[in-house]
Image (cartoon, helix red, strand yellow):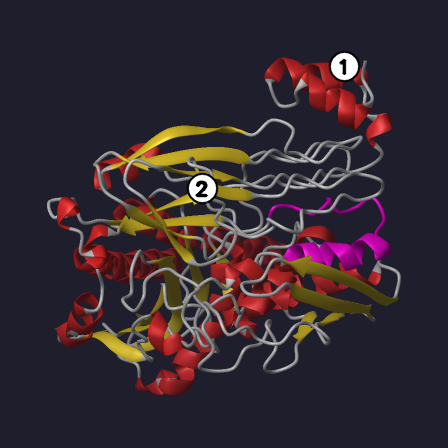
């Protein structure tokens, strides 16, 4: 075998090994995280970067919003702390929404790796924190200053040890101080695992640098992605989408231009930034737009700086997809997690029969807390104080040749949080959590179902629910190619009051919160759905007989 072939095999083996390294890094975070959002739902990410700050590999475990924002975040750390100034033992931290992952609730931790006293790589990780101070997880704020504590790029650890001053400031401003400290230390620990595994790998392969491997990864990934783009028809394709917004509907507009091995998406004409916290910082807009494009165009190419490079995202500064400081951004995924569907809307014209119908998109974060403290009602003086978070999941749009996935977090990929966890950490009781029949959009391929969740306080006391991320209650996920929309989402009290806005609502003592998540859109004409599949849906309780008659014409 020629030397060039042996070298290529060696490079591929080391590339695969590097992916295994960062996956172990992510699993270390998953196992040690204190917060149930990271530990149970997997709302985290991990990756390794070369000495130029280019992402070389990401863990399979994690979310694209975190990974793809983190891809740019490391460069901001290196601007504040040049590589030459870094020392063994250093760890750096920030939660800057514009230079990190899009909102204050995600902390990014970066750790340089050294071999023989020289920096050879950097590891980064991030995860969601339950509370960072301010008004809590809510879209009610009118500026980022109200949303919580912003930590600029700081040194969290040196060879002398942890910077307890930084940790003290973070913990003092959180309603969950033990959790947030534990999660940050988990990020530090998982990076240390990555450093140890990388240096062990380098010793095994007798490497003192990974620069050559980095160039191989970046160059091959870039070219593979460009080649996939070149197989597409060139041209410009446009898409629009309406979302509920906070105080007024949002209009998203995108024009995708396919060139020679590159794609540009321009969001010109989209709504201006909101006065409330549903804005998507540019880093988050980039992350989810590119994720949608890459899913359809080059899914087999590993995600790294090279495979991301051929995609460019443009947005008007001051728009809802590129808000300027100090715009509020806590619920940035209301907009950001809809952007893959915007990409699919454009791609459907260039690649017919290759993309799914629209999905529920933004997960519904169920941020719940005790309410009696601010009500001043002596009847509730002995009620428990709590601040917890769960998630509600809608349906994924029907896919080419397949039905959509039910109660699945697309595009974020986070898992659910077991109700037992939330019930253990609070007096809340989940009375119901089940599929919502007939919520999936009718089509030759049916959209995935949303879910119905019913929650009450086990104590005779009120609690609050932040509806910051509840969307598609006015504008449902649309079908494609003749498929029909999925069902809109609904939020209400059992007593009948509709929770129609993204505000923070009080669930009175003795009442219950009911949320019904949107279903994914259908794909293809419902008249063409096979009878045996409709019968199977009815038997499984996914479609009612009334729904089958109404939506599919069954007698």
Looking at the rendered structure, the secondary structure element under dot 2 is loop
Of residues 484 and 358, which is closer to you in this image? 484
> Could you say where residue 447 lies in the image, as x and y percent from the top left?
68, 35
- Give the residue displayed 66% in from the left and 34% down from the top: 440
- Give the residue displayed 72% in from the left and 76% down from the top: 268
The image shows residue 440, relative to residue 543, as above or below, that is below
Q: Are marks 2 and 1 in contact (CB under 8 Å)?
A: no
Quadrant of residue 261 within the rendered picture: bottom right
Quadrant of residue 313 within the rendered picture: bottom right
> Do we see residue 28 in this rendering?
no
Q: On the rendered structure, is 544 left or right of 480? A: left
Looking at the rendered structure, the secondary structure element under dot 1 is helix
CA neighbours of label 1 inside 10 A, class few (<14), some (14 to 19), many (20+): few
Q: Which mark is residue 532?
A: 1
Judging by the rendered image, the residue that carries numbered circle 2 is 415
**Viewer-nearest of labels 2 and 1?**
1
Of residues 369 and 203, which is closer to you in this image? 369
Query: In the image, which residues are magenta?
Result: 340-360
Query: Mark 2 and mark 1: span between their CA atoms?
Result: 31 Å
Q: On the rendered structure, is 199 left or right of 210? A: left
The image shows residue 284, relative to residue 483, as above or below, that is below
Say if the magenta span includes residue 346.
yes
- Give the residue displayed 28% in from the left and 79% down from the top: 154
- Give the residue displayed 74% in from the left and 67% down from the top: 254
The image shows residue 389, relative to residue 129, as above or below, that is above
Of residues 400 and 261, which is closer to you in this image? 400
> Could you say where residue 6 lies in the image, as x and y percent from the top left?
60, 54
> Could you say where residue 482 lies in the image, as x and y percent from the top left?
85, 40
Say if the magenta span includes residue 206.
no
CA neighbours of label 2 inside 10 A, class few (<14), some (14 to 19), many (20+): many
- Dot placed on the residue nearer the N-terminal end, 2 or 1: 2
Q: On the rendered structure, is 237 left or right of 534? A: right
């Amino acid at each position: 075998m020629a030397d060039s072939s042996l070298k290529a095999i060696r490079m591929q083996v080391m590339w695969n090994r590097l992916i295994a390294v960062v996956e172990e890094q992510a699993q270390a975070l998953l196992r040690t995280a204190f917060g149930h959002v990271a530990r149970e739902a997997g709302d985290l990410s991990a990756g390794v970067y070369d000495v130029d700050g280019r992402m070389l590999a990401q863990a399979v475990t994690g979310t694209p919003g975190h990974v793809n924002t983190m891809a740019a975040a490391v460069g901001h750390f290196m601007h504040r702390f040049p590589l030459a100034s870094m020392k063994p033992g250093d760890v750096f931290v920030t939660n800057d929404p514009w230079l990190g992952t899009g909102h204050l609730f995600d902390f990014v931790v970066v750790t340089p790796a050294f071999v023989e006293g020289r920096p050879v790589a950097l590891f980064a990780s991030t995860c969601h924190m339950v509370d960072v101070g301010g008004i809590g997880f809510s879209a009610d704020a009118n500026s980022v200053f109200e949303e919580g504590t912003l930590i600029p790029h700081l040194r969290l650890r040196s060879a002398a040890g942890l910077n307890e001053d930084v940790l003290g400031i973070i913990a003092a401003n959180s309603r969950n101080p033990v959790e947030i400290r534990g999660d940050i230390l988990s990020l530090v620990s998982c990076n240390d695992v990555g450093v140890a595994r990388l240096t062990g790998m380098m010793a095994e392969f007798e490497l003192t640098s990974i620069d050559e491997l980095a160039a191989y990864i970046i160059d091959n990934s870039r070219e593979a992605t460009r080649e996939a783009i070149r197989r597409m028809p060139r041209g410009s394709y446009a898409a629009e989408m309406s979302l509920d917004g906070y105080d007024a509907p949002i209009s998203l507009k995108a024009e995708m231009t396919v060139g020679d091995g590159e794609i540009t998406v321009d969001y010109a004409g989209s709504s201006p930034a909101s006065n409330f916290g549903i804005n998507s910082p540019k880093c988050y807009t980039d992350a989810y737009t590119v994720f949608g494009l890459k899913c359809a165009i080059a899914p087999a190419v590993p995600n790294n700086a090279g495979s991301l490079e051929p995609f460019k995202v443009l947005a008007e500064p001051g728009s809802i997809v590129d808000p300027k400081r100090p715009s509020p951004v806590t619920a940035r995924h209301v907009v950001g997690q809809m952007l893959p569907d915007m990409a699919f809307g454009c791609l459907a014209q260039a690649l017919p029969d290759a993309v799914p119908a629209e999905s529920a998109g933004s997960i519904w974060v169920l941020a719940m807390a005790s309410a009696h403290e601010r009500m001043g009602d002596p009847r509730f003086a002995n009620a428990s104080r709590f601040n917890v978070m769960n998630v509600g999941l809608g349906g994924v749009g029907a896919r080419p040749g397949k039905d959509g996935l039910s109660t699945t977090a697309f595009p974020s990929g986070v898992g659910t949080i077991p109700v037992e966890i939330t019930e253990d950490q609070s007096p809340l009781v989940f009375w119901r959590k089940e599929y919502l029949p007939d919520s999936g959009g009718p089509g030759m391929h049916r959209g995935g179902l949303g879910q119905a969740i019913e929650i009450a306080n086990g104590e005779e006391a009120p609690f609050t629910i932040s509806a910051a991320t509840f969307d598609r209650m006015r504008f449902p996920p649309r079908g494609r190619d003749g498929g029909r929309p999925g069902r809109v989402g609904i939020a209400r009290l059992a007593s009948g009051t509709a929770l129609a806005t993204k505000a923070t609502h009080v669930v009175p003592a003795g009442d219950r919160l009911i949320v019904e998540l949107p279903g994914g859109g259908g794909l293809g004409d419902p008249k063409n759905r096979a009878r045996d599949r409709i019968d199977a849906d009815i038997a499984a309780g996914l479609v009612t007989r009334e729904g089958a008659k109404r939506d599919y014409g069954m007698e």
